[in-house]
Amino acid sequence: MATILPTPPRVGMVSLGCPKALVDSERILTRLRADGYQMSPDYAGADVVLVNTCGFLDSAKEESLEAIGEAIAENGRVIVTGCMGREADVIRARFPKVLAITGPQQYEEVVAAVHQAAPPIPNAYLDLVPQAELGADLKLTPRHYSYVKISEGCNHRCAFCIIPSIRGDLVSRRPDAILREAEKLVAAGTKELLVISQDTSAYGLDLKHAEWPWKGEPVRAHMTDLAREMGKLGAWVRLHYVYPYPHVDRVIPLMAEGLVLPYLDIPFQHASPKILRSMKRPANEARVLERLKGWRDICPDIAIRSTFVVGFPGETEEDFAYLMRWLEEAQLDRVGAFRFEPVEGAAANALPDQVPEELKEERYARLMDLTARISAEKLAAKVGRTLDVIIDAVDADGGASGRSKADAPEIDGQVHLRDAAHLTPGDIVPVTIEDSDEHDLFGVAL
């Protein structure tokens, strides 16, 4: 007689914020799947909905509150986790019907809350999921790329940031554990590994850069060693959130050798020495320009992406003009910017000479105009070249979109292909670039 399996409870997930929060969501859902839960793609089919919140900026908090409200309206049974979970009183004051609230990285607590809200059904066929099996971890990204979180927390105390108060000081993972995860992902079909943390350059500092055995050889808990070993796994390796410490110079030759993608995501935040000091950030901007030139000498195709804050307290027109001149000289490939927002608990809130909102908007527009022009010029220089492109999506009309080695998913530009019906997501193909605009490239696969 056939065994009739009980219907397991279903969990919905809304994941907000940065890729680091996305990794947290993947870990939570993997744990729940191991307990026999199924995942629901919509509110209607879920027995309980998890909302993984962001609490970095006030605008992000408001987005999180809106997401919680929508989940309550659509489903009614909601558990809140993530960075804004540290402000449980704010959430409960607005949404008293929330079932439970946990903070970031509190995996055990959020899983326990789900167990209480929608108890798992004990069944050997449902809850004995072998997580060591290749590809067993649940992913929220497409199969062909994966985020790999190498550490939690941050030792910096930037005046505009509350991340250390939310996620704590730097806690690095062992390099062998990271490499095992990366190796498993590649074996399961990942073609691109995106290395993330709050401060990738500081990786291993808390471990005193100790060595662990990997494949019969020692590997240090150090960004350079980790990047080199990940580069041997046969996938693209992209480094995010890299502070420009001196040892970053030693990663550039790995890019020239092809072990690591020629791409660095460096959060410069500003260029004016005065503003950088107010932000409590490194302020040797002239030396950074020299290093950028040196990196490009070693690896001419290196792409540099960064983010900047406009309208930080005390930012004068002279400071902003300094930043604009610096950007003109730096010629960064990809630039994002955000207007300064006071965040509860941030030291910058108490600084004098707050910049009026209309002036923030005006400076933001000027900065984005400048960086769009620089981007357009740099992309136009790629017309006629052949670039490797990883395919993200194939359209019904035979077109496709993907990314070059200079483009990270979600935040950078794309490469749009014609006559691409024969391709599938995850393919890495040579593409002749035929045209460009301010942000994207256009071409045909060879």
Image (tube, rainbow, N blue to C red):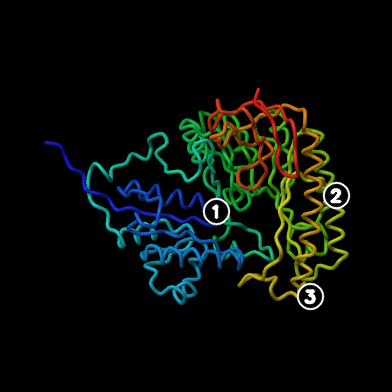
Q: Label 3, label 2: how many angstroms apart (C-alpha)? A: 27 Å
Report the residue that reaches farthest toward the left.
1
Quadrant containing the N terminus is top left
Looking at the rendered image, the disc whose residue lies closer to the viewer, 3 or 1, is: 3
Alpha-carbon neighbours of circle 3 within 10 Å: few (<14), some, or many (≥20)?
A: few
* Position of residue 171 measured from the top left corner of the image (x, y, whole percent): 55, 53
Q: Secondary structure at mark 1?
A: strand
Looking at the rendered image, the disc whose residue lies closer to the viewer, 3 or 2, is: 2
The residue carrying mark 3 is 353
* Position of residue 12 measured from the top left corner of the image (x, y, whole percent): 39, 54
The residue carrying mark 1 is 152
Q: Label 3, label 1: how many angstroms apart (C-alpha)? A: 33 Å
Amino acid type at circle 3 is: Asp
Q: Earlier in the sequence, mark 3 or mark 2?
A: 2
* Position of residue 142 measured from the top left corner of the image (x, y, whole percent): 50, 40
Q: Is 296 drawn above or below residue 240 in the view shown?
A: above
Q: Nearer the viewer, residue 244 or 51?
A: 51
Q: Is residue 187 left or right of residue 46?
A: right
Q: Earlier in the sequence, mark 2 or mark 1?
A: 1
The residue carrying mark 2 is 328
Please say if the residues under marks 3 and 1 sit with CB atoms less than 8 Å apart: no
Toward which corner of the image does residue 132 lie, by quadrant?
A: top left
Amino acid type at circle 2 is: Glu
Q: Is 300 drawn above or below residue 209 in the view shown?
A: above
Alpha-carbon neighbours of circle 1 within 10 Å: few (<14), some, or many (≥20)?
A: many
Q: Is 232 drawn above or below residue 136 in the view shown?
A: above
Q: Secondary structure at mark 2?
A: helix
Image point (61%, 36%), residue name: 401
Q: Nearer the viewer, residue 204 or 69?
A: 69
Toward which corner of the image does residue 292 lie, by quadrant?
A: top right
Q: Label 2, label 1: how many angstroms apart (C-alpha)? A: 34 Å
